[in-house]
Amino acid sequence: MEDLLPVYLPIANLSVNGVVIVLLGALTGILSGLFGVGGGFLTTPLLIFYGIPPTVAAASASTQVTGASVSGVLAHSKRKGVDYKLGAVTVVGGLLGAAIGALLFRFFQSIGQIDVVINILYVVMLGGIGALMAKEALGVILPKKEVEAVAAPNRRHHPLVTALPLRWRFYRSGLYISPLAPLFLGVIVGILTMLMGVGGGFILVPAMLYILGMSAGVVVGTSLFNILFVTIATTMMHALTTQAVDIVLAGLLLFGSVTGAQLGTLIAQKAKPEWLRLILAAIVLLVAFRMLIGLGFQPDEIYTVMPL
Amino acid sequence: MIRSLFLLLCFVSLSAQRDPILVPEVSQHEVQIEQGFVGQELLLFGAILDPSGTRAGQEYDIVVVLKGPTQPIRLREKDRIGGIWINAESTAFRSAPSFFAVASSTDIASIVDERTAAIYELGLDFIQLSPSGTIDPEEQARFTEGFVDLRQRQGLFKEDMDGVQINEQVLYQARISLPSNVQTGQYTAETFAISRGRVIASEIAEVEVRKVGFGRLVEIFSQRQSLLYGLFAVSLSILMGWVAGRLFAMI
């Protein structure tokens, strides 16, 4: 396992196969280039599965997601695909959320249920969003039965969003809505970022599309913009509190993912978007299912050790 | 005067007859964890000498115990409650060793009784974990078993009942490998010479496991300059992302 290019991780305190970690980074990089999600939802569980301590995995994965989203943000901003105003609002929410998430993390850790909470979050979030994406993608791919029967309700955003007070104009998104909606969305994603060690793109992208009703052209860029700043904040928070950021691990993951991200962008330009979404849905559901097995049937380990 | 001299003589001759001298040595007293560290095999060897110079027909068995630094831990046990596995009961151990390896020249159960094995921690079944708080012995045993099993699968606890070779009843040697996920700190290698169910001599040799070079630097940096370290990690990731973007843009 450690034969090929052994690399010692000084913070995680163990030796890993460098090639495996770079490939893992590349895989998540391709995902981020293709779909505008950071890929943290895949990196963190796989790292833990590989034997990296969970806190180190989550902390270092957030560092990696920062790098993976930089080139994406740059590319999207060049073709005016980032709504900076709306992005700034979600970032503010994200920072608040990350702070709340850190408190929740400590609370669940003190009652000894943090791993269970993380597991449940993964199953619920990934399972729900994966199912939604799969349904949508299949709806496009499969031959249409009765087109008239499924006439979608003609509304831009969720009724709750319109009910909120105070309205701002977000020109690039083509929205005139209350900033509280993206702020709240940012808070939720921030909490999840801290708890699950993910960027939150897999929640942001659908939420921006279906709840806020942003124009599709700026969704991926703005989501990446939010992920970039929130993961910077979580990396800093981990560095200062848990001291679990392993720079060697993050570096290996980054090396793979920045390359993968470019590949992903190239593929994205050629492939059919509905097939891409179906594949992403399948991956997301697979991870959720794997977590469900650990939760409902047989956990990987009955016993867990926590230093006092 | 004569009487005390006699006693002294008795003592010397008795001790000379009964307690052989054990001279242990370790192939290296310092294990350095450098970049690319994948573990290290330690050779623990030495000699058993009878002070009188004769072997006196003594048959020895040798047990070597290599033990890593201990730490207080809390061990949680998952249980199925309402259809899902959640952490239910837990217990605390005040001195759980981070590494524990036992090598013996023959099956320990055949050379000492359980009481002796428990006193000297001869075997994974006899590790002293110092449980804190009072819970019933049965539950305690279940937790201990679970902990030892977990550590065994991590390669941090091991037992080799055929791991010590003895030559001519004088020289012995054992090989114990440290995996890459060992903790740093002071390790003790204790050697026991056992004869007729009794530990007749024991000696300790020490091994220090420490990080050196780049790994050590990173560890110190992350602990003493957390803010700078975090900023450095963030800058590194932004730089790598940006450079990759530029490189691919040129292609």
Image: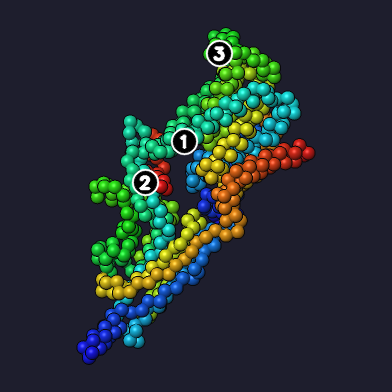
Residue occupying the point 35% across, 72% down:
B202
Instruction: In the displayed orientation, state which residue is furthest to the right.
Output: B250
Q: Are dots 2 and 1 in contact, CB under 8 Å?
A: no
Q: Is residue A94 left or right of residue A109?
A: right
Label 3, label 1: how far apart the Cα atoms are: 30 Å
Dot 2: few (<14), some (14–19), or many (≥20) neighbours within 10 Å? many
**Residue holding disc 2:** B75
Say if residue B63 shows up in the picture. yes
Could you tell me which residue is drawn at 38 percent across and 37 percent down?
A: A111
Residue A145: quadrant of the picture: top right
Identify the residue at image location x=49%, y=58%.
B184
Label drawn at residue A105: 1
The three-letter amino acid code for the residue at tag 1 is: Phe
Q: Which marked residue is nearer to the observer: mark 2 or mark 1?
A: 1
Q: Badge 3: how crowded within 10 Å, few (<14), some, or many (20+)?
A: few
Q: Amino acid at mark 2?
A: Leu
Question: Judging from the image, what secondary structure is the residue with disc 1 in?
Answer: helix
Residue A81: where, in percent of width, then height? 70, 25
Q: Which mark is residue A164?
A: 3
Subunit that carries the residue with mark 3: A
Mark 2–mark 1 Cα distance, whole angstroms, equals: 19 Å
Chain of the residue displaying label 1: A
Q: Are marks 3 and 2 in contact (CB under 8 Å)?
A: no
